[in-house]
Image (cartoon, coloured by chain):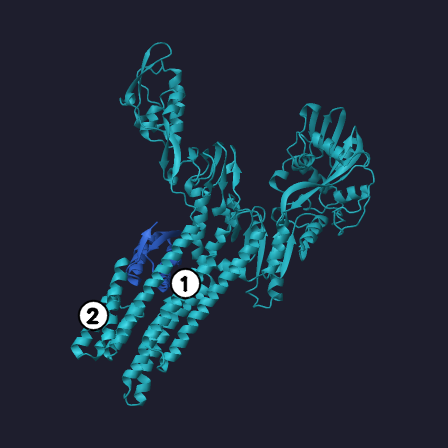
Chain colours: A cyan, B blue
C-alpha cells in the first residue's frame, strides 16, 4: 500500500510538472512522452490488469473502463485529461481502500470479544527423576513392584495400567493413581504429564503450573486462571476468588457484575479486579464469545433488500451506460458527417468513467454492517441485514408478558390480616415457608426481609398440591391455597379490597368467598400457564394449579384479582391472605414509551395469565391491546391475526409493515419463528434464545428493543441517503457529460468522491 | 450441506457481488452468499460435488479480482 502511494505521488508530481510547464504544447514527441510516463507511473497496474482481463474475455471491469477512458483521451490528444483520469481514479481507489480497511477494522475492534489466550493450570514438565521409563515402587507388603510408566501403553485404556511383574502385589496407591491416569487422559494432558501422575497427589499439585495456551485448546473441566484486565477465554464457573467482570462487550451494560465462587462467567467478558480461578464448562467453539462472533459475521449473509437492489442495479447499469457511450460516440457525429467526432468521443469517454458501479455497491453493505456492529455494541444481536431493514419498518410490537415486560419473579403485593398486623402475618408465613424452595416461599421470605431463626421451627412439612405446614414457636401455621384452607377446615373470612392493584383501575370489591371462587375459576391455561418460570414448576404450588383447574366449572373466564394468593391459617383458624404478583421490570414503561416514540403504531401484550393480571400490567405500561389467558398455540394464532391486521391497516405497502414479537426465547419459539421478526430477551448465555430468534437482546431490558429500532431506522436512512446520493450524482454527471459540460477528470472526481462520502456516511451507522 | 469459507483481500464490492452470482451458478450449488465486509463465503451445495465446486469457486474468485484469494477456514 505504501509503495502504491509513493508511486502515485511520483506520478502526480510528474503530471503536475508537465502541466505547469505546459508540456502538451511541447513538440509532439516530448510532450507525449512526459504524459505517457506520468500515466504509466500512476496507472501502470490498472492498464496491466485491464489487459489481463481482456485476454480472459472480461470487459466492464473498472480497470478496463478506466483504461479505455485514458487511452481514448490520449488518442484524441487530450494528454492532461488522460493522466488526470488515471490520477483521480487511483487516488480515489486508494482512499476507498483505506476507508474500507478502516471500517472493517473499527467494526472488528468493536466486536473485539475474542480472547487471545487462556491461562490453564496443567501439570508441568517431567521432573528429572522420572526420566526413566521404569520406576520402582514400594508395595504395601514390602515387595517391590515394577511399574512401567509407558505412556503409550497407559493411554491405550482408561484404567488399563500396564503393570508388569506382580499384578497380584499391586499396591493401593497404584490403583488410586490409575484414576489420575483416567482424569489426566480425559483432560487431554500430554503424555509426559501422565507419567507424573504416578506420584502422590500433593506432589502432583506442587508440580502443576499455569500455562498460557490458545483458548481453543482449553478442554471442559480444566481450571483456568484469569488475572485482572484479562478476557475470560471460555465459559466457566468460578471456583476460587472474588472479582467483578465487565460484560459491556457482550451486553452494552457498563456496570460491572460481581462474581464469587459458584457464579458462571462468560467468555468475552473482561475480569476487572481480582484473580479468579474457574472451571471451564464449555470449549471455546461452544462458548459465548465464539457464538456471538459467528452470529455477527454470519449476519452479512442475510442481505437487505436495498443491498440486493443495488447489486442488481449495478448489474444492468454498467452495460447500459457503456452501450449508451458507444451510441454517443457514433450516432451524433454521424449526423454531422463525423466533423466533431473527437468531441463526442470525449463525451462518450466521460460516460465510461461514470459507468463504474463500485461507489454504488460499496456503501450499502457497509452501512448495514455498521448498523449491525453498532447494535451489537449496545447488546443487541441482529442476525442479518434483512432483519435490520425489517426492524426499521416495524409498525406493531407484540410482547409476551412474563419474563419480558415483567421479571417472572413473584413479589408480595397486598396483605389482608383482619386480626393482626400485616407484618406479623407475613412473618408467620415466612417462617412456615422457610424450608420450601418454591418461588412463593422465596417471595414471602424476601418480603419478610429479616433472618429466619430456624430453631423456632420444630416441624415443617410440604403438603403437595396445597402448600406448607410448620410449627413456628408455639403456633401451628398452614400457608397455601384455598384448597388447603378447605382441607384443614379453616373458613376463609369475607374481606373487602378497596383497591386491589394499588391503582384506580380496578374497583371491584369482591368478598373473600367469591374471590376464592374466582381463583378456582381460572381459565384453563391461565395464571400459572405455559409462561410460568421454570422454577415455578415441579413444586408444591404447581400441583395446586392443575387441581384448581380441575374444579373449573368452565363458565367464568376471568379472575377478578391479579396474581396469586397464599392463605394463612394459625392453629387451624384462618388468619389472612397474602397476594403475590409478578413484578414489572424497571425499564418496561420507558421501553414502551421509547418504542412508541421510535414510530411504532401499536403495542400489544399476550399472556397466559388471567385477565386481571394482564389488565394491571397493560394499564401500568400503557399498552394498546392485551390478550389474556392464551395457550402457546393461541399465541401463534393471535400473532398471525395481528400480522394480518398490521398489514391491512398500514399506510405502507402491505408487505412492508412489519410485526415484531418479543419473547423470552424459551417458551415461545413457535411465535418467534412465525412473526416477521422474532426478538428474544435475555439471550446472554441462553443458546435456545439465540437459536430461535432473529434478533437477540443480550440483557433482559426491554428498552433495548427501542434502541434496536432506532439503530435500524438510522441505518436504513443512511443506506437510502447513500444510494440516492450515489445514483443521483452519477445521473447528473452522465447528463452533463452527454452534452459536454462535465469534463472527464470531473467525472472521475465525482465517482470516487461519492464513494468516499458514502463510506464516511456509513460510519455513522456504527454509533 | 453448507460450508463456510473466506475470501481474503476482497477490495471491490461489485466484484464480491459478481463472485456471489458466479458461484451461485456453478453446477450443484443450491445457494451462496458472500459478505463484502467480512469476506465470509457460505456455500450450500451437494456434498458429493463440493470438491469441484470449491476448486471452481477459487478460480472464479481469482478471475474476478486477481488480488483476492479463497481460503478454507
> Which class describes the residues within 10 Å of circle 2: few (<14), some (14-19), or many (20+)?
some
Residue at point 40% right, 16% down? Answer: A172
- Quarter holding the N terminus of chain A is bottom left
Query: Disc 1: which chain?
Result: A
| Badge 2 and badge 1 both on one subunit | yes
Q: Is residue A251 visible?
A: yes
Q: Secondary structure at mark 2?
A: helix
**Which label belongs to residue A37?**
2
What count of labels does the image hold? 2
Can you give x and y, in whole percent of width and height, for residue A126 in the image? 31, 26
**Which label belongs to residue A759?**
1
Q: Nearer the viewer, mark 2 or mark 1?
A: 2
Residue at point 42% right, 52% down? Answer: A297
Q: Secondary structure at mark 1?
A: helix
Can you give x and y, in whole percent of width and height, for residue A372 in the image? 47, 55
Query: Disc 2: which chain?
Result: A
Amino acid at each position: 500500500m505504501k509503495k502504491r502511494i509513493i508511486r502515485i505521488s511520483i506520478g502526480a508530481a510528474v503530471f503536475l510538472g508537465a502541466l505547469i510547464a505546459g508540456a502538451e504544447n511541447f513538440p509532439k514527441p516530448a510532450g507525449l512522452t512526459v504524459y505517457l510516463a506520468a500515466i504509466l507511473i500512476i496507472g501502470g497496474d490498472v492498464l496491466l490488469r485491464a489487459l489481463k482481463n481482456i485476454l480472459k474475455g472480461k470487459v466492464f471491469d473498472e480497470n478496463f473502463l478506466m483504461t479505455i477512458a485514458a487511452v481514448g483521451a490520449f488518442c484524441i490528444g487530450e494528454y492532461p485529461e488522460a493522466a488526470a483520469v488515471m490520477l483521480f481514479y487511483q487516488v480515489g481507489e486508494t482512499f476507498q481502500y483505506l476507508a474500507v480497511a478502516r471500517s472493517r477494522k473499527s467494526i472488528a475492534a468493536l466486536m473485539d470479544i475474542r480472547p487471545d489466550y487462556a491461562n490453564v493450570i496443567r501439570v508441568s514438565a517431567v521432573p528429572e527423576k522420572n526420566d526413566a521409563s521404569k520406576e520402582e515402587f514400594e508395595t504395601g507388603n514390602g515387595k517391590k513392584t515394577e511399574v512401567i510408566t509407558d505412556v503409550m501403553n497407559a493411554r491405550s485404556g482408561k484404567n488399563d495400567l500396564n503393570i508388569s511383574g506382580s499384578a497380584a502385589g499391586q499396591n493401593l496407591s497404584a490403583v488410586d493413581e490409575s484414576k489420575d491416569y483416567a482424569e489426566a487422559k480425559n483432560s487431554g494432558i500430554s503424555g509426559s504429564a501422565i507419567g507424573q501422575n504416578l506420584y502422590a497427589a500433593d506432589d502432583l499439585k506442587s508440580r502443576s503450573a499455569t500455562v498460557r495456551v490458545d483458548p481453543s485448546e482449553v478442554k471442559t473441566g480444566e481450571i483456568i486462571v484469569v488475572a485482572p484486565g484479562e478476557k475470560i477465554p471460555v465459559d466457566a464457573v468460578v471456583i476460587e476468588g472474588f472479582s467483578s467482570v465487565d460484560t459491556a462487550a457482550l451486553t452494552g451494560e457498563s456496570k460491572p457484575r460481581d462474581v464469587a465462587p459458584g457464579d458462571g462467567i462468560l467468555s468475552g467478558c473482561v475480569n476487572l479486579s481480582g484473580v479468579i480461578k474457574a472451571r471451564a464448562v464449555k470449549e471455546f467453539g461452544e462458548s459465548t464469545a465464539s457464538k456471538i462472533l459467528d452470529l455477527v459475521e454470519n449476519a452479512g449473509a442475510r442481505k437487505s433488500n436495498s443491498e440486493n437492489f443495488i447489486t442488481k442495479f449495478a448489474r444492468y447499469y454498467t452495460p447500459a451506460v457503456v452501450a449508451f457511450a458507444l451510441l454517443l460516440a457514433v450516432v451524433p457525429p454521424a449526423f454531422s458527417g463525423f466533423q466533431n467526432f473527437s468531441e463526442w468521443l470525449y463525451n462518450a469517454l466521460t460516460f465510461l468513467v461514470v459507468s463504474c458501479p463500485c461507489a454504488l455497491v460499496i456503501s450499502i453493505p457497509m452501512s448495514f454492517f455498521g448498523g449491525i456492529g453498532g447494535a451489537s455494541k449496545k447488546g443487541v444481536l441482529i442476525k442479518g441485514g434483512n432483519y435490520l431493514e425489517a426492524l426499521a419498518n416495524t409498525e406493531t410490537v407484540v410482547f409476551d408478558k412474563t419474563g419480558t415486560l415483567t421479571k417472572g419473579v413473584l413479589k408480595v403485593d397486598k396483605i389482608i390480616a383482619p386480626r393482626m398486623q400485616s407484618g406479623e402475618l407475613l412473618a408467620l408465613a415466612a417462617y412456615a415457608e422457610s424450608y420450601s424452595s418454591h418461588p412463593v416461599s422465596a417471595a414471602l421470605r424476601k418480603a419478610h426481609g429479616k433472618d429466619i431463626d430456624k430453631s423456632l421451627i420444630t416441624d415443617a412439612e410440604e403438603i403437595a398440591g396445597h402448600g406448607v405446614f410448620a410449627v413456628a414457636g408455639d403456633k401451628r401455621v398452614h400457608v397455601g391455597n384455598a384448597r388447603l384452607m378447605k382441607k384443614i377446615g379453616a373458613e376463609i373470612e369475607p374481606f373487602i379490597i378497596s383497591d386491589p392493584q394499588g391503582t384506580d383501575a380496578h374497583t371491584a370489591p369482591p368478598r373473600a368467598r367469591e374471590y376464592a371462587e374466582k381463583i378456582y375459576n381460572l381459565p384453563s391455561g391461565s395464571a400459572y400457564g405455559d409462561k410460568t418460570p421454570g422454577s415455578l414448576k415441579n413444586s408444591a404450588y404447581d400441583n395446586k394449579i392443575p387441581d384448581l383447574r380441575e374444579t373449573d366449572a368452565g363458565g367464568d373466564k376471568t379472575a377478578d384479582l391479579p396474581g396469586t394468593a397464599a392463605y394463612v391459617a394459625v392453629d387451624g383458624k384462618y388468619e389472612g391472605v397474602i397476594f403475590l404478583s409478578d413484578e414489572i421490570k424497571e425499564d418496561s414503561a420507558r421501553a414502551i414509551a421509547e418504542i412508541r416514540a421510535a414510530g411504532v403504531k401499536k403495542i400489544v401484550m399476550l399472556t397466559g395469565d388471567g385477565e386481571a393480571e394482564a389488565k394491571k400490567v397493560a394499564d401500568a405500561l400503557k399498552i394498546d391491546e392485551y390478550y389474556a389467558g392464551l395457550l402457546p398455540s393461541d399465541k401463534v394464532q393471535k400473532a398471525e391475526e395481528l400480522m394480518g391486521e398490521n398489514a391491512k391497516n398500514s399506510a405502507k405497502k402491505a408487505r412492508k409493515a412489519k410485526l415484531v414479537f418479543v419473547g423470552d426465547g424459551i417458551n415461545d419459539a413457535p411465535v418467534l419463528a412465525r412473526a416477521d421478526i422474532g426478538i428474544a430477551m435475555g439471550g446472554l448465555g441462553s443458546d435456545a434464545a439465540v437459536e430461535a430468534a432473529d434478533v437477540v437482546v443480550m440483557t433482559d431490558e426491554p428498552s433495548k428493543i427501542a434502541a434496536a429500532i432506532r439503530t435500524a431506522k438510522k441505518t436504513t436512512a443512511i443506506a437510502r441517503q447513500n444510494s440516492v446520493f450515489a445514483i443521483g450524482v452519477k445521473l447528473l454527471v452522465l447528463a452533463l457529460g452527454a452534452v459536454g459540460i462535465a469534463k472527464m477528470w470531473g467525472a472521475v472526481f465525482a465517482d470516487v468522491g461519492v464513494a468516499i462520502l458514502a463510506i464516511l456516511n456509513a460510519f455513522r451507522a456504527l454509533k | 450441506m453448507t460450508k463456510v469459507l473466506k475470501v481474503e483481500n476482497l477490495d471491490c464490492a461489485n466484484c464480491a457481488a459478481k463472485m456471489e452470482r458466479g458461484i451461485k451458478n456453478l453446477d450443484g450449488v443450491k445457494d451462496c452468499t458472500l459478505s463484502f465486509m467480512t469476506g465470509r463465503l457460505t456455500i450450500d451445495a451437494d456434498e458429493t460435488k463440493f470438491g469441484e465446486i470449491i476448486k471452481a469457486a477459487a478460480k472464479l474468485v481469482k478471475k474476478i479480482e486477481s488480488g483476492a484469494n479463497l481460503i478454507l477456514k
